[in-house]
Image: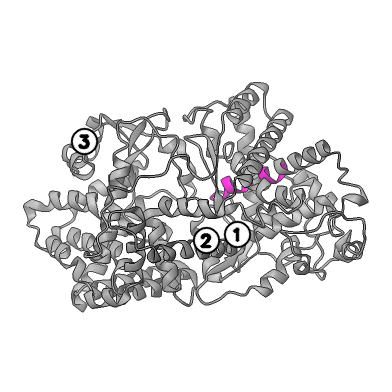
Amino acid sequence: MKSFPLIVAGIGLASAMVAACSHNSTEHLSSLNAEYIDSTIAPGTDFYSHVNKKWMEANPLTPEHARYGRFNVLGDTSEARVRSLVEGLGATNPQPGTVAYKVWTVYSQAMDTARRNAEGAKPILADLKRIEDTPAEGMDSLFMWMHGNYASPFFGAGPMEDFNNSEIYAMYVFGGGMGLGDRDYYLKNDERNTAVRNAYKTLIASQMKNAGYSEADAARIVANVMKIETALADSALTREESRDLVRMNNRRSISEVKAAYPAIQWDTFFPQTMGIATPDSVIVTELAAVNQANSLMASLSDREKKDYYLWKYVSQASSELSDDFTLANFEFSKVMSGVQEQRPLWKRALGATEGALGEAVGELYVEKYFPKSSKEYMIGLVENLRTALGQHIDNLDWMSDATKAKAREKLAAFTVKIGYPDKWKDYTSMNIDPALSYYENMHNVSMWHQRDTYSKWGKPVDRTEWGMTPQTVNAYYNPMANEIVFPAAILQAPFFDPNASDAENYGGIGVVIGHEMTHGFDDQGRNFDAKGNMTDWWTAEDAAKFAEKAKGLIAQFDEVEVLPGLHANGAYTLGENIADQGGLRVAMTAFKESQNKKGVDINSPEALIDGFSPLQVFYMNYANLWASNIRDEEIRSLTQGDVHSLGCNRVNVTLRNIEPFFEAFSITEGQPMFRPESERVIIW
């Protein structure tokens, strides 16, 4: 982030602190802590630091964290609650076969490092031998077995809502097969990507030796894996290209797929890997990547394929084996994120348990920690934000009436999910047996979830499903369901507090709601209509105007140097940046309207909240959400692989487009936070 010179001007904190002595205030700060606001940094100089610097100083990074912020604080609270719930199950002596028994067994086995260390690599040796012993004539079957059970080598496939008809599932085939995920780690030779690549090679070698392979065999496996994954990376979409969902909507008949990718036995692929009949058509999201996978499968030797499969297998198993394996993973994560210490065992065990039976844990969570009143408050808040976004759409000066009508139709059709699902997952058929190794049980869990996904094929889309558990501190928008979802765990301070002022709640959860709503109209969401179908509902002129405005927002983030020589990626983070801006603007409109309905004059001395105006509190609590300390390695990793901008930029870059923010803090030309009106970008 740029460091701005200190310029004290406008309202500043000095005058605000004087006002704090006033006795006019009838409300007090709750989510915000005024003691953390730094009076030595003027709001117009660096608003993020003005609000958060003292919090950051009071919450330094500990060795286990690559970054630590307000989300982590809430995560810690949620985690502590879940730990209490899960460990409490042990005292109830749950009966075998019950969901409580399964939850407790997974957690207990995850905590039992003594058993895992005694077993070492034993739980996976038979499968590794199967890979090694496969004859030439069995290589196609080996590929099917790997794809159906372990880590999807070369490419991925599975059912998901149809881009063009969101009421049914389509079969998708997509690129993949790269352990590092992002193509730049393989293809770029700068210092950062080279360091990650070398650490990955070390990881592969270490894990293969942990699995019993010799130094020489491990070196050969490293070379073959890097050859294959680098080739896959060379054909993968760039980060920016991966945001273009329209270019991914490539429907092909199965006969076209067979002709284009003949090295893959498609007639047996779907029956053997998914247990379904071969579909009539598929959507190939990355044509070049799947073509590269086909070429590799046709040209690689059996030895090269086996080495790749061995690594894919060991990689997916490593976190559920002995300490030798988990420590090797940790050594790699140190390079990726800069973290210095492994998370405590109980946190890792809890994460595995929630990954296995997340909704079972969530059901316990909401029963104890999510009051009905929070859901009722949220319902009203959401409708206020929906009304406000509708007003914004109506008032756009760059959009035609025809497109506005379609946008309004989509807004009205938003489905809202708050707190927890109406229907919980049924884990009755999941097999968890304490006699099995931890790895075997977790593999059974993985296969259960995979079967659950594949079982959707041929059925109508279930709109009641959730993509997050209630105990997750997050929220999301799903364009193919046109739904916004707010899990119970995010409904805590500083996002939401029933005892906080409206200014704090609208600047917190109100902005989050507006953010998720705006995703329906960002660079990806705008490609889907009210029913969640990929439809071009824009006039050509309006689409061109949107693209031009988006280009301006991209440039604003591109110019920010997050570390020496490293700039933010405005194109990759465009959707989140549009949503941040939209969330702020829409939440402010809704907040003002809510106060009007209450007869509150937000500009009067009586409306002050501990000496701050309601508008100041609104924007300060927004900045408060993103308070965070972060390591340089994590900044590099997130800039390369996260669609969200860094927290400091979500505050400072975004707010520099918003006129009411300038007014709230008397920010004027000449101050670093000010942006001339001609350079501001307003989309929604």
Of the two numbered discs 3 and 2 on the same chain, state the one appearing first in sequence. 3
Would you name the residue on which mark 2 appears? 638
Residues under numbered marks 2 and 1 in contact, where contact means CB atoms less than 8 Å apart: yes
Queried whether the magenta region covers residue 575, the answer comes back as yes
Residue 366 in percent (x, y) is at 52, 51
Would you name the residue on which mark 1 appears? 646
Give the dominant element type of the magenta stretch: helix, strand or loop. helix
Q: Could you say which quadrant of the image residue 628 lies in?
A: bottom right
Q: In front: 40, or 25?
A: 25
Counting the numbered discs, the total is 3
Identity, as a three-letter code, of the amino acid under mark 3? Lys
Look at the image and tell me in which quarter the N terminus lies: bottom right
Report the residue that reaches farthest toward the top: 402
Helix, strand or loop at mark 3 = helix
Q: Which residue lies at the image location 67% right of the left edge and 70% below the top edge?
A: 56
Residue 235 in percent (x, y) is at 35, 50
Of the two numbered discs 1 and 3 on the same chain, state the one appearing first in sequence. 3
Would you name the residue on which mark 3 appears? 258
- Residue 600: mark in rendering: none
Task: Say if 333 sits above or below 249 in the image.
Answer: below
Q: Answer few, some or many: residues within 10 Å of disc 2's Cα (few below 14, many 20 plus, some between 14 and 19).
A: some
Report, in whole angstroms, how far the alpha carbon at label 2 lies from the one at label 1.
8 Å
Residue 318 visible in this rendered orientation of the protein: yes
Of the two numbered discs 2 and 1 on the same chain, state the one appearing first in sequence. 2
Q: In front: 403, or 183?
A: 403
Q: Please provide the residue range marked out in magenta.
A: 572-585
Q: Locate residue 492 relative to residue 670 in the image: left or right.
A: left
Report, in whole angstroms, how far the alpha carbon at label 1 lies from the one at label 3.
43 Å
Residue 455 in percent (x, y) is at 29, 39
